[in-house]
Image (cartoon, rainbow, N blue to C red):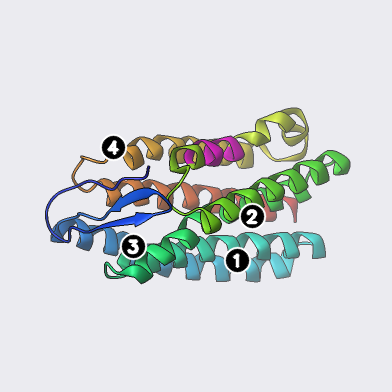
Amino acid sequence: MAVFRLKQFSSDRRSIGGGIIRWDYDKAELIADGVVHILGMVFGLVAATALIVLTAVYATAGQIVSVCIYAAGLLGMLGLSATYNLWPVSPVKWFLRRFDHSAIYVLIAATYTPFLVHMQNKWLAVAILVGVWCVAAVGIYIKVKLPGRYDRLAVLLYLAMGWSGVMAYDSLVSSLPNSTLWLVAIGGVIYSLGVIFHAWERLRFQNAIWHSFVLIAAGVHYAAVLDLILISS
C-alpha cells in the first residue's frame, strides 16, 4: 500500500490498484517543492543542450547517440516529475503518477548508457545494457498496469538497478577515467541517501528534500557524463 501522509493543507485520498494514495502537504511545502522542480527543469534544459552540443563536436557517433538517450531520459524524468508534483489534486494527478514513477526506471537505464558504450569489453557492456533496459521495461509495466501496488518493491528495484554496475566493476575501472568513476559513485550515494527522506513521510518538507537529493544526484551524474566526453575526446 502506498501512502503519502503529511500536514493539513491540500489533503486528499484516492484508491489506486488496491492502495491508498494521500496528498497532504501545506502551502509552504508545495511552494518549496515547486521551486525545486522549476530549477530542475531550467538547469536541466540548459545542461542537456550544452552536453549534446559538446558531444556533437568532440565525440564519436556512438557516443552522440548514447548521450542523446541519456539527455532524453534526464529531461523526461524532470518534466514528468514537475508535471505530476505540481498538478492540482485530481484524477489526472493520480494518472500522471504512473509516468512519473516510470520515468525513474528510464533515467537509471539512460544514465548507464553512455558509460557502458565506452566500456572496452563490448560483450559485457551489451549484456548489462540489455539487462538494465529489460528491468526498466518490467518496472514501467508494473507502474503503468498496477499503479499504487508494489511501491516498496519499486524502491528496492530502483536501488538494485542503480548499483547493478558494481557487477562490471573491473571492466568499468579499466575503461572509465577515475574522475568519472568517482562522480558516478558520489551520485549513487546521494540518490541512495535521498531514499531516507523519500520514506520519511512525517517530516515537513519531505517531498522537497527528496526531490532536492534527486536533483543534486542527477547533477553529479551529469558531471560524470560530461567528464567522460571531454576526457575521451
Q: Few, some or many C-alpha atoms within 10 Å of disc 1 (few <14, some 14-19, many ≥20)?
A: some
Residue interval drawn in magenta? 155-162
What is the CA distance from the residue labelled 1 to the residue labelled 2? 8 Å
Of the pair 2 and 67, the residue shown nearer to us: 2
Q: Few, some or many C-alpha atoms within 10 Å of disc 2 (few <14, some 14-19, many ≥20)?
A: many
Q: Earlier in the sequence, mark 3 or mark 4?
A: 3
The percent coordinates of residue 41 (x first, y second) are 42, 67
What is the CA distance from the residue labelled 3 to the residue labelled 1? 20 Å
Identity of the residue drawn at 88% across and 41% down: 123
Q: Earlier in the sequence, mark 3 or mark 1?
A: 1
Q: Earlier in the sequence, mark 1 or mark 2?
A: 1
Assess whether residue 54 is covered by the magenta stretch. Answer: no
What is the CA distance from the residue labelled 3 to the residue labelled 4? 17 Å
Identity of the residue drawn at 78% across and 33% down: 171
Residue 92 horizontal side relative to residue 143, left or right: left
- Quadrant holding the C terminus: bottom right
Look at the numbered discs 3 and 2 and tell me whether their residues touch, using CB distance below 8 Å.
no
The residue under label 2 is which amino acid type? Ala
Which mark, residue 6?
none
Residue located beneath label 3 in the image: 85
Q: Few, some or many C-alpha atoms within 10 Å of disc 3 (few <14, some 14-19, many ≥20)?
A: some
Identity of the residue drawn at 82% across and 46% down: 126
What is the CA distance from the residue labelled 1 to the residue labelled 4? 30 Å
Circle nearer the viewer, 4 or 2: 4
Which mark, residue 200?
4
